[in-house]
Amino acid sequence: MPEAIGAGFSVLAVDDEPNIVSALRRTLRSRGFTVHTALGGAEGLKLLDVQPVDAIISDMRMPEMTGAQFLQAARLKMPDAVRVLLTGYADITSTIEAVNHGEIFRYLSKPWDDDVLLSVLYDGLERKRLARERDQLLALTREQNTQLQAHAEELEEKVRERTHDLQAANDAVSAANARITADFQGTVKMLSTILEKRPGLTDGCSRRVAEHVRNVGPRVGLCGDELQDAVYAALLEDLGKLTFPEPWLTTPLHALNSRDRDAFTQHPLHGDGYLMSLASLRGAGRVLRSLYERWDGKGMPAQLEGEAIPLGARVLRAASEYERLRSGSIETRRFSQEDACTWLRNGSGTRFDPKVSAALVALLNEDTSAVPTRALAVGALKPGMALARDLTAGIGVLLLSKDHLLDDAMIRRLDSFQRRVGQNLEVLVYRSTT
C-alpha cells in the first residue's frame, strides 16, 4: 500500500470522544489525508453542508444520533463518499441495519487496527482515484481534441486561402495565356495580310483557306494542336513566296513554263525553312512542307502516299486549291463555286484524300445562313458582341480576327481608327439568339 495513499483526498472523522477523533486525525494525516472532524452526527452533517469530503468514518455509538443514522443522512448529502463504520461486537444488529440502509462500504470493530483502517480507505477510494484519473484523461482528451479541432480549422482556412490564391494565380495565368494566344494568332493573321499585299496575291485568300481548314478539319479527325498547326500553315502559305519575282505571282500557275512552275512549287519548302526556328510554328512548317503531296503518291517533295501524308496537309491542299481556283491563281480563269467543287470531286483519290474532298464539298454546299449575323456601324456596336468574320480596313489591314469579343476599349479604338483614316467601317457580328 502506498505511503501517501491519502494525497488529494479528504476524510471526515466523527466521534463523540475527542481522544478517538484525535487518534483518527493523527493516523490519517500521516498518510496524506486532509482531515476534518466532528464531535457528533449533527455537527458532522453541518460540516458536510459546506465541506465536500471523499470518505466518512463514524463511530456507531453516539448520543442523540447513532453512527448508522448519521451515515444514512450523510449519504443523502454526499452520496459518493466512502462510508466506514466503527462498531463494537454488541452492536452487530445495528451494524447490519446501517450497512443495509446507509450503504456502508465497510465496518470495523473497535479498537481498530490502523493498517486495516488505511487498507479499507485505500480500497474504497481506489474507485475514486480511478474515476479522477479517468476524468483527468477525458478532460485532457477534450482539451487536445479542442486544440486539434482548432488546428484543423486553422489548417482548413489556410488551405482555403492557399487554394483561393492558387486559383486566382491560375486564373491570371490562364487569362495571360489566352491574351498571348490571341495576340499570337492576331500576329500570324497580320503577317498573312501583309504577305497578301504583294501583287498577284489575293487579299483575304489565306484567311478563307484557314477558315475552311478550321471547319473541315474536325469533320475528318483533325483536332487539337494538329488542327491549329494546319490553320497557321494556311495563313502562312504565301510566306515562301516572299522572294519570288512578281511575274511568278501575277501569272496563273498553269500558265508558267515548266522551269518556273517547278521553282514556284518549292515555296512550301521555303516556308518550312522560315518557320523551323520558331517553336510555336514548327508544326505549321511541317504541314506546309507537304502541301503538294498527292493522295496517289505522285506529289512532292517526298512522294508520300495516302495516309502517310500528314492529315493537316491533306486538308490544307484541298482548301487551298479550292480558294486559289476561285481567285484565278491556278488556272487562267476564275472558277465558280460549282466548278471548283467539281474539281475537288474529280481529284478525289488522286490529288486529294477522298474523305477530305467530300467533307469540304459538303461544307461549301451547306446553308451558311444558319448562323445569324448582322452588319453594324462602329457606333452601333455593344460590349460583348463577337465578330462573325475578320475585320479588315479598305487599305488591306487586318484589324480584328473572327470571334474577337468586343469591349468598350476596343470599340473606342475602332471609332478612333475610322476617324483617322476617313473611312466608315462595317462590322459583321453574330446576332444574339436570346
Image (cartoon, grey):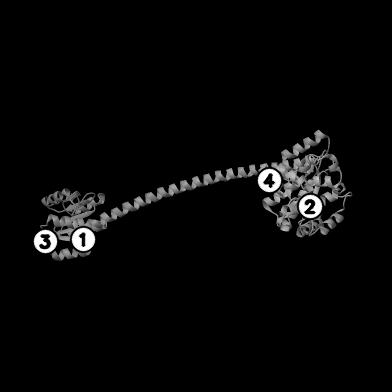
Q: Secondary structure at mark 4?
A: helix
Give yes or no for contact between labels 4 and 3 (Cβ–Cβ under 8 Å): no
N-term mark: 1 or 4: 1
Q: Identify the disc placed on residue 88.
A: 3
Residue 59 x, y percent position in the rendering: 15, 57
Q: Which quarter of the figure has residue 357?
A: bottom right
> What's under tag 2, amino acid-wise?
Ala
Determine which residue is flagged by label 1: 105
- Sequence order check: which comes first, mark 4 or mark 3? 3
Inter-mark Cα distance, 4 to 3: 112 Å
Q: Position of residue 219 (x, y in %)?
A: 73, 57
Q: Are marks 2 and 4 in contact (CB under 8 Å)?
A: no
Kind of residue sitting beneath label 1: Phe
For residue 319, which numbered disc appears in the image? Answer: 2
Viewer-closest of 363 and 44:
363
Mark 3: which amino acid?
A: Gly
Pair 2/1: label in front: 2
Image position of 72 with respect to 144: above or below: below
- What is the C-alpha distance between the residues marked 1 and 4? 96 Å
The residue that mark 4 highlights is 282
Mark sitting on residue 301: none
Q: Secondary structure at mark 1?
A: loop
User: What percent of the width, then of the height, locates residue 320?
Assistant: 79, 50
Asked if the residues shown at circle 1 and circle 3 are in contact, with their CB atoms under 8 angstroms apart, the answer is no
